[in-house]
Amino acid sequence: MLAEAKEVCPSTTRRMLESGALMIDVREAAEAAAFAFDVPALVNIPLSELERRWEEVPRGRPVVFACESGARSLKATYHLQFHGYDNVSNMSGGIVKWSAKGFPVKGARSPCGCATGCCEPSAAESSACCGEAAAPTSCC
């Protein structure tokens, strides 16, 4: 049985990064491009690719997984623990909490609150982002 995943807050994550930890953003590339963590030690390995790319994660360095809210990064943390990693953590609250604390980001959250604008309606729809007429996607 796996040990419970280590959870860290954005403040602890910043201290870890200053001490040499690596942050891995597991959001999809388009999400990370639209609204990103502005940190020097950042790698994007989407959760959808982690099963085939997990060996890219260094074993000799602390790693903090992050995403929009902490849910996908928690899955990534457990995935790496399953593969024998013991120096991995999940940043609870994700980029939402990170940016709310005023920590550095690139880009801007969409008007509806999604960090990525992923819930904007298609060009065929004329309603506002995540509005009543527009069906929000899974990130909203």
Image (cartoon, rainbow, N blue to C red):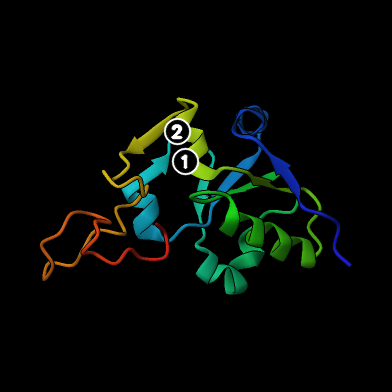
**Between 35 and 135, which is closer to the camera in this rendering?**
135
Residue 24: x %, y % from top left? 56, 50
Instruction: Give the residue at x 48% y 42%.
Output: 95
How many neighbours does mark 1 have within 10 angstroms: few (below 14), some (14-19), or many (20 or more)? some
**Would you say residue 40 is visible in this rendering?**
no
Residue 68: x %, y % from top left? 48, 50
**Mark identifier at residue 49:** none
Q: Quadrant of residue 118?
A: bottom left
> Does the CB distance between marks 2 and 1 fall below 8 Å?
yes
Q: Which amino acid, by three-letter code, is at mark 1?
A: Val
| Mark pair 2, 1: CA separation | 6 Å
Q: Quadrant of the N terminus?
A: bottom right
**Mark identifier at residue 99:** 2
Q: Secondary structure at mark 2?
A: helix
Q: Secondary structure at mark 1?
A: helix
Instruction: Give the residue at x 57% y 42%.
Output: 93
**Mark identifier at residue 96:** 1
